[in-house]
Amino acid sequence: DTGVSQNPRHKITKRGQNVTFRCDPISEHNRLYWYRQTLGQGPEFLTYFQNEAQLEKSRLLSDRFSAERPKGSFSTLEIQRTEQGDSAMYLCASSPPQQGETQYFGPGTRLLVL
Amino acid sequence: GDSVTQMEGPVTLSEEAFLTINCTYTATGYPSLFWYVQYPGEGLQLLLKATKADDKGSNKGFEATYRKETTSFHLEKGSVQVSDSAVYFCALSDLVGGSNYKLTFGKGTLLTVNP
């Protein structure tokens, strides 16, 4: 069990560029979550996958955001036409079938949009 | 909707002092309750959890009891150490749509323990 991993750990981009983040959950965890955390705040839910199906998206997830989990394993989160307000820590979490309420978090990807 | 309110920080204590961080919640269903800890530059680590009323979660000397009558889940530790310095988040998980256990977090409380 190597834990949830996320890449890259840090990303600096210019406004208007597209960025993509990757999350590798713990093996055999069927649920995968994305959250966004801004400075001084708790994480906020963005989206949820059960296996490969995206079952819920928050209203925080504008049309510029898209997430996939093509084979029910790793997931990607893409932001198109980034804005300065997208600057935040993007956290991924996964949970196992037997204990769905317990989520294990990755180290996060810190995005800075200039 | 669901919400979590936790004690605002920062909290500064001397080593071996007693710690309490208050947390109250609002939920429509029967949530599970959690405390997560975030060390500088790292992601969130699960500290402890409780899944039903009157359950006590405990780990590394930290404890919290699920109090349904007061909708609270206060974090306590009898004797803090410098290594406990971190941001602590209270959170609840309420089952949505049959399978989504999305977490709702408080704003976090920064704890600094001085030697």
Image (cartoon, coloured by chain):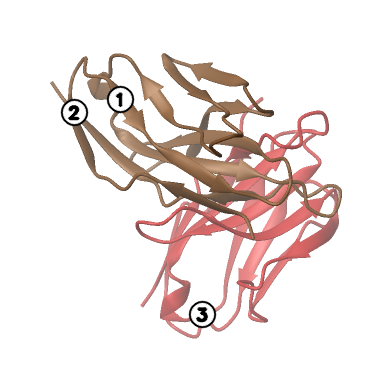
Chain colours: A red, B brown
SS label for mark 2: strand
- Measuring from the top left, give residue B103's x and y in whole percent: 62, 48
Instruction: Give the labeled residue for mark 2.
Output: B13
- Measuring from the top left, give residue B21's x and y in whole percent: 36, 34
- Measuring from the top left, give residue A100's x and y in whole percent: 76, 36
The answer for how far apart the CA atoms under marks 3 and 1 are is 41 Å
**Which amino acid, mark 2?**
Leu
- Do dots 3 and 2 share one subunit? no
Q: Is residue B56 above or below residue B87?
A: above
> Please, which chain is the residue tagged with disc 2 on?
B
The answer for how far apart the CA atoms under marks 3 and 2 are is 41 Å
SS label for mark 3: loop
Q: Look at 81% across and 60% down and name the residue there.
A: A54
Asked which quadrant contains residue A60, the reply is: bottom right
Instruction: Give the labeled residue for mark 3.
Output: A82
Q: Look at 70% across and 52% down and name the residue there.
A: B28
- Do dots 2 and 1 share one subunit? yes
Q: Which numbered mark, 3 or 1, is in the foreground of this view?
A: 1
- Image quadrant in which the C terminus of chain A is located: bottom left
**Looking at this view, is A33 or B97 the one in front?**
B97
Tell me if label 3 and label 1 are in contact, CB under 8 Å. no
> Please, which chain is the residue tagged with disc 1 on?
B
Q: Is residue B51 above or below residue B98?
A: above
Residue B19: image tag: 1
